[in-house]
Image: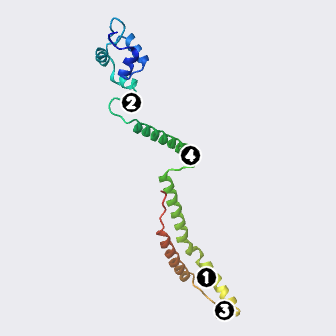
Amino acid sequence: MEGMSERDYSAHSGLSRGAIQKARKTGRLVVYGDGSINAAASDVRRADMTDPDQQRRSTGGDSGFSGPVDSSSYLKARTALTVYQAQERQLAIQKKKGALVERARAEALVFRLARQERDVWVTWPARVAALIAAEVAAEVEKQSGQPVRPERPVIIEAAILQRVLETHVRAQLDALADLRVSLG
């Protein structure tokens, strides 16, 4: 026997015996007359005829990419992509169910609600000042035990009471103005 057997050439080249048999059938190996394999000539012919990516894959070199690739970084990137896609799908489902709203819309709603509340409080003293003045006057007369006499009635001016109420309401609203809503 002049050359190597299939089993010996398989060990020499790092390919499986089935790959060696396939290479022999397709003419990528140089074979002597006795059927043994010329290792040096076969290595050259196989290198010339075989696609480098295909050769690397057959030896377990990489997963189909040309050039230096770290398979663990590919797996990490693929896993990260899969996790990202799952999270994106979950957010889409929550949005469709109405569990999520757009940030700009939520901020606009909060701002509108705060403005409505402020407007109600700003106009409140003008609406209740006269009622409060009348109630306070009646309570003072009741507490004094004196009947109401036309010559000495208890009078609380609604305009003065309104100014006092407005001052206190504005102070309260100024304190609330420092409050900031954070949605994120």
Position of residue 104 relative to residue 67, above or below, is: below
**Could you say which is closer to the camera, residue 21 or residue 176?**
21
Q: How far apart are the alpha carbons under marks 1 and 4?
A: 53 Å
Q: Secondary structure at mark 1?
A: helix
**Amino acid type at mark 3:** Pro
**Could you say which is closer to the camera, residue 87 or residue 75?**
75
Side of 83 where 9 appears, left or right: left
| Residue, disc 1 | 133
Residue shown at the point (45%, 41%) measured from the top left:
80
Residue shown at the point (34%, 9%) measured from the top left:
1
Side of 140 where 18 appears, left or right: left
Q: How far apart are the alpha carbons under marks 3 and 1?
A: 18 Å
Please rate how many residues cluster around mark 2, counting C-alpha atoms within 10 Å: few if below 14, some from 14 to 19, many from 20: some
**What is the number of the mark on residue 94?**
4
* Label located before the other in sequence (1 or 4): 4
| Mark in the foreground, 1 or 4 | 4
| Residue, disc 2 | 62
**Amino acid type at mark 1:** Ala
| Mark in the foreground, 4 or 3 | 4
**Amino acid type at mark 2:** Asp
| Mark in the foreground, 2 or 1 | 2
Contact flag, marks 4 and 2 (Cβ < 8 Å)? no
**Could you say which is closer to the camera, residue 65 or residue 37?**
37
| Residue, disc 3 | 150
